[in-house]
Amino acid sequence: TRKESSAASDVYKRQDYDPSESSLPWQAARDAGFAAQFATPLGMPAYADSRLVSLGFGPLNPLLMTPAADLARYHAMTRDPAFCSPLPYAGVDPAAYEGLLIPGGHARGMRSLLESEEVRRIILAFFQADKPVAAVCHGPLALARCIDPASGRSVLHGRKVTALLAGPMELAAWLVTAPWLGRYYRTYDHSVEQEIKAALASPADFLPGPWLPRRDSAEHPERGFVVRDRNLLTARWPGDCHRFANEWASLLQQARDAQPQAQQAER
C-alpha cells in the first residue's frame, strides 16, 4: 500500500470544520508531493461550515469570514477525488499513512470528530509510531482526549502545544456574535484552552503566542504562530494556517527523509 498523508475531516448532520484549516495544509502537502486520504465518521464527503464558506457574518466579515483566496483553495480541495471518496473512521489503518492532520472548527457538528473513539484509536497509533501529527484550533482537543494506556495520561502529556485561545479568540468571538448566532462559537461550556491545559504536564506547556494575533497570508506566513514539539505540530486559528501548512509539509518531508536512515540503522 502506498503511504500518503491522512486528513481527518468531519461530517454529522452539520460538518462545521474550518475551510482554511483543512484546505491550506492539503494544498501545501500536495505541492510537496503528498496525497491526502480523507476520513469522516461514516465515509461520506464532509463539507466545511457553511457560514464560513458562504453565509458569512455581515459587517463582521473582515474579522471572521474565510478570506477569498483561502476559499478558492477549499473549493479546489472539494474537487479532489479523494475528498469525494473518504474512508470511514473505522476503516482507517494508521500503518498505511505517513501523517495525520486534524483541522478545527467551533460549531457543534465538530463533536462527531472530537468525541469519536475511532479518532482516538487513530491518534494513539500515530503517536505510538512517532509519526507526524498536526492539529489546529479545536483539533488539539481530540489529542488531549486520547489516553495512552501505557501511561494513563493524554498523549499531549509532556508536550508543548498551542490551540484556540480562550480570551482573545473563542470567548471574544462568542460575545460579539451571540446576539444573533447564540452558541455558535461555543462547542462546549468550557474553553478549548482550559481543557487542553488540564491534559498537559504543566499549564506552562500551553504556548499562547501573541495575545493580539495577526492573520497570516501566502505572502506573510511569518505572521502565523505554530508550536512544534518533535513530530507534533499545533496552531491556534485559521489566521495561523499559511505558516501551519508550510510547516506541515516540511514535517512530512523530514519524516519521509528520515525513514531510509532509520532502516539503514536497523540493518
Image: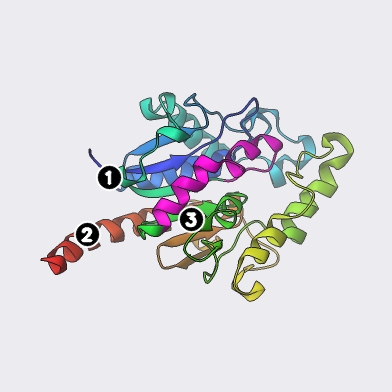
Q: CA distance from mark 1 to mark 2?
A: 16 Å
Q: CA distance from mark 1 to mark 3?
A: 17 Å
Q: Which mark is residue 259?
A: 2
Disc 2 marks a residue whose amino acid type is Gln
Label 3 secondary element: helix
Question: Is residue 72 located in the magenta-colored stretch of the structure?
Answer: no
- Quarter residue 57 falls in: top right
Q: Position of residue 194 (x, y in %)?
A: 72, 61
Q: Please state if 166 lies on the left or on the right of 246 as rendered.
A: right
Q: Please state if 157 lies on the left or on the right of 188 as rendered.
A: left
How many marks the image carries: the answer is 3
The residue positioned 56% from the left and 65% from the top of the image is 161
Magenta residues span 104-127
Q: Is residue 186 visible?
A: yes
Label 2 secondary element: helix
Question: Is residue 126 located in the magenta-colored stretch of the structure?
Answer: yes
- What residue is pinned by disc 3? 244
The residue positioned 57% from the left and 50% from the top of the image is 142
- For marks 1 and 2, give the one nearer the viewer: 2
Q: Position of residue 61 (x, y in %)?
A: 72, 40
Label 1 secondary element: loop
- What residue is pinned by disc 1? 33
Count neighbours of disc 1 (C-alpha within 10 A) and say few if under 14, some if 14 to 19, many if 20 or more: few
Q: Residue furthest left?
A: 267
